[in-house]
Amino acid sequence: MKWFDDDKLHFALGIEDTFVPQTREGERAIDEYELTEHYTHIDTDLALATGVGAEMLRWGVPWHRVAAARGQWDWSWLDRALNRFQQLGLRPIVDLLHYGTPLWLDDQFANPDYPKHIAEFAARFAERYADMATDYTPVNEPMIHALFSGEYAYWPPYRHGPTGLITIAAALAEGFVLTQQAIAGVLGDEATFVHVDAGMRYVGDVDDPEHRETVARLQQQRFLVEDLVTGNVREGHPLLAQLRQGGVTDNHLSWFADNAVQPDVMGVNYYPLHSTEVFEKNVHHGGGFADPRPFRDAGTEGLREVLTTYADRYGAPVMLTETCVTGTVAERISWLDASVACLHELRAEGLPVVGFTWWPLFDMYEWTYRHSTNPRADHLLTMGLFDLVETGSGDLERRRNPVADRFRQLATASALSPTLIRK
C-alpha cells in the first residue's frame, strides 16, 4: 500500500528551492539554499521538520551543483542530505527540477538536448538513492517555468510571447515524460509520482470583450504541460492551434500520446493572496512580474475550486503541495487553520485530498533578489514556521515562532483522528 492509500491527511513541509544560477548584467544568480544557508544547516534544518510533526518534506535537488560541469557528478552533499532524511525517518518528496539548469547547458530549456540531460540526471539520482527516496516531482510548476522563461522573458533562456511559451512548455513536457520514465525504469512499482503545478485562477471582467479571448486562453493554458504529459492533447483540445503555431508538430503530439505518464498524486500549489488574478474593465495587464495583473484574496473558496478542478480533470488523489501567506504570525496561523479545515471538509465531502503542505519550513527570500543589488535582508519574506534572523556574525539563525506550534498541533491531530474519504 502506498502512503496516500490510507485514510490520513498527511502533513508535509517544504524548503524553498528556486535555483537560477545564470547571470547577466543587472541580474545575479539566485540559489535559495545558498541564500537561506540550507547547504550549511542541512542536518539541523531537516530535524526542524520532524520536530514540528511533519511526515514528509518537499525538497529540491540543486542540479546546477551536482552537475557543475558536463559529464561530472558530485553527490557528496546529497549523500549527506539523504542519509539525514533516513536517520530522521523523514520522507522526501524529491523536486528534481525547481527552476533552473546547469550553467553548461546553453539555451537552458530551449536546448534541443535538455530533455535527454534532465532524464539522465533523474536516472542517476534514482539509482544512487533507490533505498532512500521513492517519491518524486519531475518538474515543479512547469507552467510557471514556461511563463517566466518562455513568455515573460524574465528567466533564461528569455524567450517571449506565444511562440516562446510553447517552445518552453513543450520542452519541459518532454523532459517531464522522460524523467518519469527514467525513474520508473529504476524503481518500478516502488516509485510514486507527485505532479505539481500552480493553481492559477482568473476572475473579474472575464466576459468583457477586451479580455474574453485572453481569459479563455489562460483558463486552458494553466493545464497545458500536465495535459501534454498525460497524453490529453488530442484533436479538439482548445490549445491545439496555439501548439501548432508554436512549432509543435503532429508527430510530437503523437509522441506525447504514446508515452503518456500519469500522476499518482496531483499536487496543486495555492496561495490565497496571489493565485487569483483579476481582470479589470478598460485596464490591460500582461501578467508576470514585469506587468502584473492585480490579485484578489480568494481564501478557501479559491482553494476548494482548484483542488476540485484538478481532482476531476486528472482523476487522481490531490494534495495541497504549497500554501502559506506572507504576513504576521497571527495572519499565518489564521490561514493555516482555515486551509487545513478546508481540506478536512473536502475529504468529508468525498474529495480524495491526501496531503497538506505548508511552504516553507523557514522564511525565504523573494525572487526580486535576482534583479537587485540590495542585501538579501531587503528581500526577506516572512512565511515560515521558523524566522530567519541574521546574527552579528552574519549567520542565519532559525528562530521558532508560534506557527510551528500550531502546525504541530494540527499534524498530530490528523494522525490520531483521520477523516475517511470515499475511494
Image: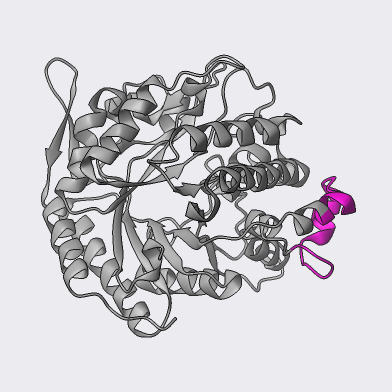
Magenta span of residues: 233-254
Residue nearest the viewer, comparing 280 with 342: 342
**Considering only vertical position in the picture, is 2 above or below 376?**
below
Name the one closer to the observer, 271 or 38: 38
Q: Quadrant of the N terminus?
A: bottom left
| Residue 302 locus on image (x, y percent) | 43, 70
Q: Is residue 249 magenta?
A: yes
Q: Is residue 69 visible?
A: yes
Residue drawn at 19 percent across, 75 percent down: 417
**Percent position (x, y) of residue 31?**
42, 27
Q: Nearer the viewer, residue 104 or 216?
A: 104
How has the structure been colored for display?
one colour
Residue in the picture at 52% in, 69% down: 316
Left or right: residue 29 versus residue 361 is right
Name the residue at the right extreme.
250
Q: Is residue 69 on the magenta stretch? A: no
| Residue 363 seen in the figure | no
Quarter holding the C terminus is bottom left
Judge whether 70 appears above or below 215 on screen: above
Q: How many marks?
A: 0
Q: Which residue is found at the position 84% from the left and 67% from the top? A: 235
Name the spot of residue 373 as percent of width and height, x first: 40, 19
Q: Residue at x 60, y 52 (%)?
A: 285
Residue 158, x across and y down, in percent: 66, 31
Q: Quadrant of residue 241?
A: bottom right
